[in-house]
Image (spheres, rainbow, N blue to C red):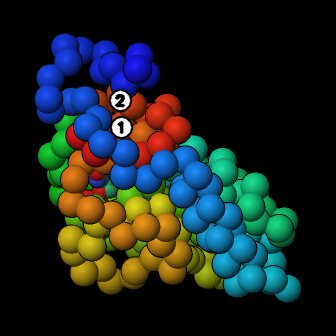
Amino acid sequence: MDILRPSGPVSRLNAPSRVVYDRERIAARVREMGAEITEHYEGRDPILVLGLLKGSFIFLADLVREIQLPVHVDFLVASSYGAGQAPSEDVRLLYHPDVEIRGREVVLVEDIVDSGATIARLVPILEGREPKSLEICTLLHKRRAHLAQEPRWIGFEAPADFLVGYGLDYAEDFRHLPFIGAL
Ligand code: IMP
Ligand code: MG
């Protein structure tokens, strides 16, 4: 299968070895999450969905189409991992939108919570802009750390493996896989 070929030399370490969540399972769960979010915000102000690039782009695209309410979409760019698999404590916000967050019902969308450093860093920054509410929605959660603010919506409790596909990368490879696999 050609889409599984990394851009560099192939080794056991950088080729997905098994499917963890296939596309049907992901789609079914995303549909449920969209319904849960719809129910939560029913009768409230329009939602502002803030996607954390790049990892959340496919999840976010599928998720917003399952939300049966008015939704605005913008993105944040944070740096956490470098090129490889090692997490860094130094999470920086490289871009944040000009969109007014004050008074909005904000949903921060993450691909995966691992050490929790990204969320721990971003939540205070976003809270500082005084949203009416701020909730976190993540497709995957590795439950490696205790977070000050846990995501309200979690797609799957993820295994400890390094996961790729459906937006998740290893050194920028494999984001386009329609399923989630483990290296
Ligand atoms: P945290 O700050 O340690 O929670 O890591 C969050 C970010 O690290 C995610 O948004 C991902 O971009 C990346 N990450 C963590 N675990 C994985 C993984 O298993 N595969 C791919 N990226 C990951
Ligand atoms: Mg990444």
Which quadrant of the figure has residue 113? bottom left
Q: Where is residue 80 drawn, in percent x and y?
A: 28, 48
Q: Secondary structure at mark 1?
A: loop
Q: Residue at x 47, y 34 (%)?
A: 177
Q: Nearer the viewer, residue 70 or 18?
A: 18
Q: Secondary structure at mark 2?
A: loop
User: Which residue is painted at 25% across and 29% down in the image?
Assistant: 15
Q: Which mark is residue 86?
A: none
| Residue 153: x %, y % from top left | 52, 75
Whether residue 54 is visible: no
Assess disc 1: are there few (<14), some (14-19) or many (≥20) residues with their C-alpha within 10 Å of its C-alpha: many
Residue 23 visible here: yes
What's the residue type where badge 2 is placed?
Answer: Glu
Q: CA distance from mark 1 to mark 2?
A: 5 Å
Residue closest to the eye, 11 or 43: 11
Q: Is mark 1 within 8 Å of ligand 2?
A: yes
Q: Is residue 17 above or below residue 66?
A: above
Residue 119 on image: x %, y %:
37, 66
Q: Residues within 10 Å of mark 2 (few under 14, many from 20)?
A: some
Q: Determine whether 71 is above or below 15 in the image.
A: below
State the image coordinates of residue 9 (x, y, percent, origin top left): 19, 14
Question: Circles 1 and 2: CB distance less than 8 Å?
Answer: yes
Task: Tell me the kind of residue under disc 1.
Answer: Asp
What residue is disc 1 on?
Answer: 169
143 on left or right of 67: left
Residue indicated by mark 2:
172
